[in-house]
Image (spheres, rainbow, N blue to C red):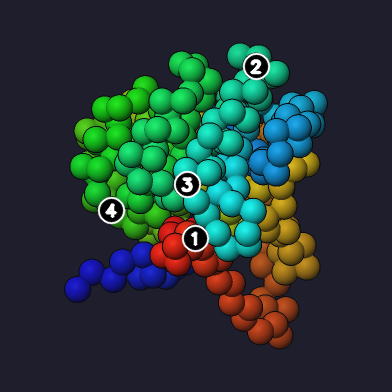
Amino acid sequence: FEGGRVLTAAIAAIDLALHDIVAKSLGIPVYQLLGGKHRDQIPCFATCGMPSAEELISNVKLLMDSGWNVIRVMMAPGGSEEGIFEPRESIPLTADRVIALREEVGSGPVLGVEYHHRLSVAEAASFCQRMPSGTLDFLEEPIRDESPEAYESLRSMTDVPFAIGEEFASKWQFMPYLERGITQFARLDVCNVGGLTEAMKVAATAEMHYIDLMPHNPLGPICTAASVHMAAAAPNFAWLEYRITPTDSVREFDTEMFPIQLSAEGDRIPVPDTPGLGVEFNEALAKEKSFEFWEAPHLRRRDGSYTNW
């Protein structure tokens, strides 16, 4: 029986550890095990919330002044009440604010919007149709991804490039999205898909279809390091998600637990030449700490029905 994402995440932990062990035993960085590196630095994108139109523009300008050129903005709130998300309230707000942002910053920066699987096909189409051509460089995960046919239907309604795949747990889940041109960026997560072994197979398949990787990377120093080595070794790479920026700190990476870890210099992470992944883990400290479970928010609509987070 197929184990799904939980099993492939466990496999990823073992796979990444084995790559780190073998590379350290040989005295080489992990990317050498993957065929060598195509680049010395990994371009990253920053994330920006959307509390208001004014704050959005201010935060994006702050990022640009700090050297960031690829910026993803989160969708506008879909209601003022806590725990409520109404797509039809979020869509016009998000569209108006993104259009105003593009007019303010010009055509130079790469701009994308993240909708985190919260829309239906009709709602996503309505959002895309509000976007003047050239406003958005990508739209991330507007609808749930279990049905390639649903995404294919949405793909036929808009020319906005899609970024899909952060929840995929195998190369087979990626296959229809790559082969049928449904996504234009592969949001590959090395910790969901089973580690570097499986990730490089997805990367190669994406390369065959001229689709660049845009890895999902909110999980911490080990995922960041593994993603950097994958991005160095894959020829078809766009940008890596990085969550410690002037406008975002979704995961403060624990420097006591991870005394040696990779970090960005401006909007790029230098590819390390140290043996292994380039991360050191304080195993003794980890044994002393209890596991802290994080539960995703629970969202609903005003009629009481459940909606995606």
- Which one is in front, 131 or 114? 131
Q: Earlier in the sequence, mark 1 or mark 4?
A: 4
Which three-letter amino acid code belongs to the residue tagged 3? Pro
SS at badge 2: helix
Disc number placed over residue 302 in the picture, else none = 1
Tag 4 near tag 3, CB within 8 Å: no
> Spatial distance from mark 4 to mark 3, Cα to Cα?
20 Å
> Spatial distance from mark 3 to mark 2, Cα to Cα?
24 Å
For disc 1, the neighbor class at 10 Å (few under 14, some 14 to 19, many from 20) is: few
SS at badge 4: loop
Residue 23: horizontal and vertical position, in percent? 52, 55
For disc 4, the neighbor class at 10 Å (few under 14, some 14 to 19, many from 20) is: few
How many marks the image carries: the answer is: 4
Q: Single out the mark in the foreground, 2 or 4.
A: 2
Q: Is residue 98 left or right of residue 302?
A: right
> Spatial distance from mark 1 to mark 3, Cα to Cα?
11 Å
- Which one is in front, 22 or 266? 266
Disc number placed over residue 87 in the picture, else none = 3
Disc number placed over residue 146 in the picture, else none = 4
Residue 136 in view (yes/no): yes
Q: Single out the mark in the foreground, 2 or 1.
A: 1
Which three-letter amino acid code belongs to the residue tagged 4? Glu
> Spatial distance from mark 1 to mark 4, Cα to Cα?
25 Å
SS at badge 3: helix
> Spatial distance from mark 2 to mark 1, Cα to Cα?
33 Å
Residue 103: horizontal and vertical position, in percent? 65, 16
Which of the 4 image quarters holds residue 109? Answer: top right
Q: Earlier in the sequence, mark 1 or mark 3?
A: 3
Q: Is residue 170 left or right of residue 160?
A: left
Q: Single out the mark in the foreground, 4 or 3.
A: 3
Which three-letter amino acid code belongs to the residue tagged 1? Arg
Q: Which residue is mark 2?
A: 103
